[in-house]
Amino acid sequence: MELLKASSLDEAISALFGENRQIAGKRPVYGGDINQSYRLSLSDGAPVFLKCNTLNNLSFFEAEAKGLKALRETGTIGVPEALAVGTDQGRGISFLLMNYLEAAPKADRYWELFGRELAGLHRADCAALAGGEALPFGFSEDNYIGRTPQINTPKADWISFFRDCRLIPQIRMAERYFDAGMCRQWQILTDRLDAWLTEPEFPSLIHGDLWSGNVVCGPDGKAWILDPAAYVGHFEAELAMTELFGGYPAAFYDSYCEINRIDSGYRERRELYNLYHLLNHLNLFGSAYWGSVREILNRYV
C-alpha cells in the first residue's frame, strides 16, 4: 500500500477507511518523549495509531514512514505499516497514521524468535536502499535519531560512513562539553578509526535505534520493531545498541548467532559503536551522559 499524503487528519481517515468513517474517540498511548501518541477509535470501532507533533515536524514523520517501509519490505520481522502522513492546520499538527498493534501474550520462545528474525533482517538484500553497489552504506535520504537529524549520505565503506555521518556530527554538536585535551582525543579517534573498526562482510539494513522501548510484542505474539532511525550499515552497530541500556536475554543473542555469526572481535568494538548514541544523549539531554562518553573515549585513546 502506498503511503497517503493528506492535508488533514479527517481527509486521511476518509481516504483510507471510507467516507463514512470518522474518529469516534481517542486515548493517549504513553512511552515516547518526542511525539504525542494516541489510539484512535473509528466510528465502526476499528483502531488506528496516531503520532503527532507541531506543524513544522512533518519531515520527521515522512522520514519515519520511509524507514518503516524499508524494514517492512524485507519481510523478515514484524513492522507496523505506515498508512498516511500529513499536516492538519485546523488541529495545528503534523501526523503519522499507522496500523494499531493489539497486545497479545508473548509466544513461546519469544526471545529466540526475535533473535532469528533480527538476524534475518540483517542478512536481507538492501542493495537499493543507499547508493547502489558502489555506495552501499547510508540511506536514500537523511532521517532522525531521536530529535537529532541523522546524516545518511551514501559512502563506499562502512568506516568512512560511521566516522563522517555518525561520530563527527555528534562530536561537533557536543564541543561545548570538551576541553582541549578531549578535543585532541576525538581527533585521534576519528583519524585512526580503522585501527578498531572493521568492514562487514556485507551491508545490513538496520533499525538504527533498537533499545528495548522500540520493541513491542505484536498481535502474533512475536517481537515487532518501531520508531526506526533506519539505514544501511554494519549489523554490529545494531547489536551494540541492544546492549547499551541493559541488553536482551542470552537466548536472543544465541539465536541470532544461529542465523548470523558475530565475530569474536565485536566485544572490542561494541563501546565504540555506542559512543554515537551516548553522544546523541549528551546533546539531547545534557551533562548526565558526559561521564559515560569520557570513559569510553579514554578506553580507546
Image (cartoon, grey):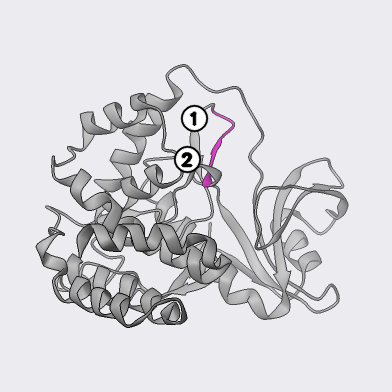
Is residue 207 or residue 248 the one in the foreground?
248
- Position of residue 83 relative to residue 261, above or below, is below
Question: Contact (CB < 8 A) between labels 2 and 1?
Answer: yes
Q: Is residue 20 visible?
A: yes
Quadrant of the rendered structure where residue 18 is? bottom right
* Residue stretch rendered in magenta on the structure: 214-220
Return the residue at label 2. Answer: 78
Image coords of residue 233 (percent x, y): 27, 60
Q: Residue at x 64, y 67 (%)?
A: 85
| In magenta segment, residue 215 | yes
Q: Is residue 154 visible?
A: no
Q: Could you tell which of marks 2 and 1 lies nearer the N-terminus? A: 2
| In magenta segment, residue 94 | no
Element type at mark 2: loop
Quadrant of the rendered structure where residue 96 is? bottom right
What amino acid type should be assigned to the residue bearing mark 2? Answer: Gly
